[in-house]
Amino acid sequence: MTPYDSVERQQLEQRMKSGANWLYWIAALSLVTSIISLAGGDWGFLVSLGVTQLADAIANVGADRIGWGVKLFALVFDLIAAGLFALLGMFANKRQTWAFIVGMVLYLLDALVCLLIGFWLGLAFHAFALYSIYGGYKASSALELDKQAPPAPVV
């Protein structure tokens, strides 16, 4: 028997997946927010990446001066950023602890964008999302340690 019984193991698996799925949510909602912004809308999701929102704002201003190509460039940037977080979510769901770490570092850096532009509600939501991703990381680490533990002696 492993150090964790099946109930504890299931709870760890659920926390790990919950934390990993935050990376998917960040990717998806950032992309939706970007599409809304580039289409001329003025609202978005709090979990969205600040860097994509900044790129979209710059593109919206630039499109008036340079042309629609700036918005296309911003959309490609948004797709790459969202794709990176989706990829991290995929690896995190496969219990790759490095994906949690990279995701947390990137999202923490993105929180600095929110701090610099004074988007306090977005910053607070970044903190909540980081806490949730960290919970997934801790669960993934515990599951990895459990996998590496020697089997318990049979009595």
Image: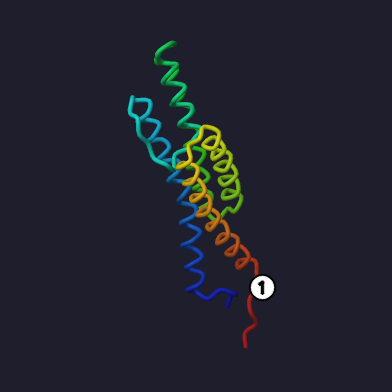
Q: Tag 1, which secondary structure?
A: loop
Name the foreground residue: 12 vs 56: 56
Number of marks present in the image shown: 1
The extreme bottom residue here reads: 155
- Give the position of the C terminus as an image quadrant: bottom right
Please give the name of the residue rendered at 53% of the width and 45% of the height, measured from the top-left corner: 88
Please give the name of the residue rendered at 47% of the width and 68% of the height, measured from the top-left corner: 10
Residue 103 x %, y %: 56, 45
Q: Is residue 61 left or right of residue 144?
A: left
Q: Residues within 10 Å of mark 1 (few under 14, many from 20)?
A: few
Q: Does 93 appear above or below 72?
A: below
Q: Does 8 appear above or below 43?
A: below
- Give the position of the N terminus as an image quadrant: bottom right
Residue 105 x %, y %: 60, 44
Please give the name of the residue rendered at 55% of the width and 33% of the height, measured from the top-left corner: 116
Residue 111 x %, y %: 54, 40
Residue 75 x %, y %: 43, 26
Name the foreground residue: 67 vs 64: 64
Please give the name of the residue rendered at 41% of the width and 21% of the height, measured from the top-left corner: 60
- Give the image's coloring scheme: rainbow
Name the foreground residue: 151 vs 86: 86
> Residue under circle 1?
150
Q: Is residue 84 left or right of residue 98?
A: left
Specify the amino acid type for callout 1.
Pro
Q: Does 106 appear above or below 144?
A: above
